[in-house]
Amino acid sequence: MKTQKSIPTTKVERSAKFVKTGIQIGGNYIKHYSKKLFNPEMDREQLNEDNATDIYKSLSELKGSALKIAQMLSMDKNILPKSYVDKFTQSQYNAPPLSGPLIVRTFTKNFGKTPEQIYDNFNLTSSNAASIGQVHQATLNGKKLAVKIQYPGVGDSISSDLKLVKPFAFRLLGMSERELSIYIKEVEERLLEETDYELEVRRSVEFSEACKNLSHVVFPKYYPELSGKRIITMDWIEGLHLKEFLQTNPSQELRNKIGQALWDFYNFQQHELRAVHADPHPGNFMITPDENLGVIDFGCIKELPDDFYHPFFSLISTDVINDKNKTIDAFRKLDMIHADDSPEQIEFYYKSYREMISLFAKPYTSSTFDFSKPDFFEQLYMYGEKISKMPEFKQARGVKHFIYVNRTNFGLYTILHELKATVKTDTFKPHVGME
């Protein structure tokens, strides 16, 4: 893959890139409608393909928050046309890597030394390039290390980038401005944390220590003394990403073992730590040669405050969901039903959200769940498709915590579905009072 020699870092350079992409997309629409004059039956597949290619190319050169949003959207498979999902999924594993001189400059700026002066060996060719940084292999005192380097300008450009992403998001997601603003505000807060590598190292040490007794889950050791604002050094974990792992045709027993480790990792955090690794895309996990789940990135953590945790997870307990008044009360606390809603609106949202929660909670309602079954996911996607077309859901509803909690849990469900795993779902249960 071609390396990238520079990244647009100023507001002017980055907005010029967005404008250029907007013009290309406009051209794609003109091309599409010109062809449609001669072939009225033509669908939007080629248009989506062209737009997805142009948007991804632009975002992958800008990197940072712009590319991170592409990554997030690729996980919401029921929101975007398939061509966007296929293209944006690349951002989970590979974006164009930075060139050697740019990497050396980052080290010199952060440590006053080149990589060769810090490590015994340092490979200038990255082994993995994603949205916020790229990973290089190094050795020191006989130890194999992974060195994560943040792209220049990423942290400084988050707010302005998100403003520039808005028009694309309007067109792709069909969200109202208020809904999009709430979404973007929450994304901005998490992204600012993700670009703070010193915070990430502290959290990585803290979370790997808290989760160390979970079965079949392993973490790298982190080296704060070899890390800084834009660089993280940790042990190198050998293994395969999910896609590569599945290509080895693993046994059902092994799929279940990895799936169980993943389920326990997420539910232990949600219910015991009340803070969760909120970036469940496959690029953040490795399946190691000794059949463990390696967790290699703690950049995005979402804390679950009591006033969200209790009403949300109490809905998963059948006692609450079967009591209409208690359910409506929980929906009010979560801002899914508003104070000024009419009785008709209350009834409509009660029925709609009850259906949604009942679907979401299915894995929790029995002691084991088979994630290989497509009907569960078809129901989820059909429900998403149905409400996306309803005018009642064009206005913003629900507290901001839903954005990352939904993303986390549906991301978890999706990986378990790809694994075709059957897992015990009663290992870590929600701590809510059963009334």
Image (cartoon, rainbow, N blue to C red):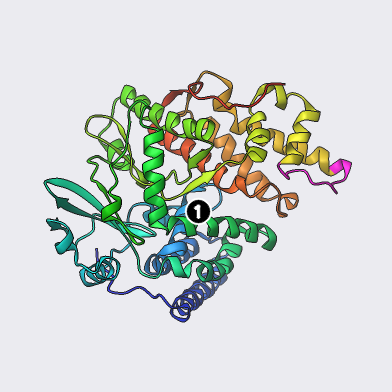
Report the span colored magenta.
334-344
Residue sticking out furthest to the top: 367
Q: Nearer the viewer, residue 210 or 330?
A: 210
In the image, taking residue 404 as reference, residue 118 lies left or right, namely left
Tell me the SS state at disc 1. Answer: helix
Give the quadrant of the N terminus: bottom left
In the image, taking residue 329 as reference, residue 249 lies left or right, namely left
Placement of 135 over or under 237, stated as above or below = below
Residue sticking out furthest to the right: 343
Disc 1 marks a residue whose amino acid type is Leu
Residue positioned 55% across, 47% down in the render: 404
Q: Is residue 52 at least partly visible in the picture?
A: no
- How many residues crowd mark 1 within 10 Å: few (<14), some (14–19), many (20+)? many
Q: Nearer the viewer, residue 393 or 200?
A: 200
Q: Position of residue 204 (x, y in %)?
A: 38, 44
Q: Position of residue 352 (x, y in %)?
A: 72, 38
Q: Nearer the viewer, residue 273 or 418?
A: 273
Residue annotated with mark 1 = 73
Residue 305, magenta (yes or no): no
Residue positioned 39% across, 75% down in the render: 8
Residue positioned 37% across, 25% down in the render: 256
In the image, taking residue 247 as reference, residue 40 lies left or right, namely right
Answer with the quarter of the image where residue 316 lies.
top right
